[in-house]
Amino acid sequence: MSDRRNAPGTGAAPPAPGTRTGAPALPQEALEIAAGYAFTGPALDLGALLWDGTCLPDAQIRVPLTMLNRHGLVAGATGTGKTKTLQLIAEQLSAQGVPVFLADVKGDLSGIAAPGQPNDKVRSRAAEVHQPWQGTGFPAEFLALGGIGHGVPVRATVTSFGPVLLSKVLQLNQTQEQSLGLIFHYADTKGLELVDLKDLRAVVAFLTSDEGKAELKNIGGLSTATAGVILRSLTAFEAEGMGDFFGEPEFDTAELLRTAPDGRGMVSVLELAAVQDRPRLFSTFLMWLLADLFHDLPEVGDADRPKLVFFSDEAHLLFDDASKAFLDAITQTVRLIRSKGVGVFFVTQTPKDVPAEVLGQLGNRVQHALRAFTPDDQKALRATVKTFPDSPYDLEELLTGLGTGEAVVTVLSERGAPTPVAATRLRAPESLMGPLEAEALDRTVTESALHKRYAQAVDRESAYEKLQPRPGKGPDEITGERRPGKGPDEMVDEGERGGEAPRRKAGKDEDRSVVEQVVGSGMFKSLARSVGTQIGREITRSLFGTARRRR
């Protein structure tokens, strides 16, 4: 094979605009590749085949719409065009009525809401790949973690986020993660809602107090040293300004599944530029969104189109320093969420950033150029080549010679088989390739129905308030007795009876703290007994330990 074939971005000039070579004129090997992308059903158009240094616009490279819930990978070095590829795919999904979620780490995907501006580069690319380009904006919602940055605030309650993901964020070790899981289990069974971080601190403090130590004794207990590590981690976490991400109103991930009135899929853009210096947090939050969707969506089997396609940017951050249990949970979630109609695309620099167990679930691949400047780069390049099917290309040379906006593509055909590897000159996005102006972005956010629903944070009574020492409530109008605040078991019992708790006699009990009432109630026995008597009250948890009780 010639050197020109290995460097598709150079060599012979592309055909003149409007010139059509006709499929029979294609070289035999190119014809065989093109035949692998001749789908009969709805498909997304990625671009035109590159062969022997020439763009062949009659050989269109596409991906079947039905296969986009089989997951994918968009990879490549910085500056090779990954972001524009995301934009291109998102536009076409939206146009075909499929909602899209985009993690916008750099802050330049907001332009998807505005029509693109024609220029010489856009016109040249459109002519090369025979793309009928027309500037078009797409329906978009803009979200921001904790309301930091432009966008509707996205928050999660600590209860919903769960111990596994929170341990990842707090960088706890395995022993500490197990202890945190025990704390969540205790809070779940006792009806102590963990809305924000102060609620979690209150429960940890109680379980290490003289009154609370006995509560976990029968199921392993909580050491003072481990509790101290957890509390210090929470304090440091809040000191970095991350407490705002936890609270209410909690974001309902069903909002990501909406379509616009004209039938196009809504593009939900989560702005992460303001928190890109906190990668462990935002990458874990992306997994929470995905896990929450997994809990709620019904099985749909093989549908004619996805319910949602979810793009997780900077995917390597999710897997860095992850425990085996965490990786197993990711693998199982990715494997199972396909049957619920959700496609997941991981976006990163090289396939080696993604564990083999997860990579094996990704049927669609768009690989942009890689660099081979160092021995580590060369090792990564060779590893990447091994992840592709056999092809007539010299992939090591090809992947280092691709130009911006060019990629090596292989997807799943309509019958689920991998298509031939195809060097591709990608189409140009039709929306604005850059950030939306701040004024237009703010206007879009404030006019959104989601803004009215989620903008204002609320702080209702939860675990922190329930565990605080407090005086008794006002005198009962009938008896004149004063009723103290209720402990967790008493609140559970009251809720199960649907009525009031038994009234207490006045006396020195009226000034006892909630903790003292809990311990002295005679009802606050072992956690095992509570689990048995409070069936239906306990929050069931998923693979990631995220709450499955619907808000």
Image (tube, grey):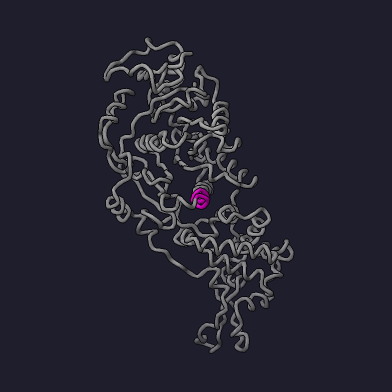
Question: Residue drawn at (62%, 85%), measured in percent from left and top?
Answer: 509
Residue 87, horizontal then vertical, whole percent = 38, 37
The magenta segment: 279-285
Q: Main secondary structure of the magenta part?
A: helix
- Residue 368 vs residue 324: left or right? left
Q: Is residue 284 magenta?
A: yes
Residue 518, horizontal then vertical, whole percent = 64, 75
206 relative to 31, above or below: below
60 relative to 315, above or below: above
Residue 456, horizontal then vertical, whole percent = 39, 63
Residue in the foreground of this view, choosing between 435 and 89? 435
Question: Which residue is the extreme one toward the front?
Answer: 374
- Can residue 307 be seen from the camera position used here? no
332 relative to 56, above or below: below
- Residue 148 vs residue 359: left or right? left
Question: Residue drawn at (28%, 16%), measured in percent from left and top?
Answer: 19
- Can residue 377 be seen from the camera position used here? yes
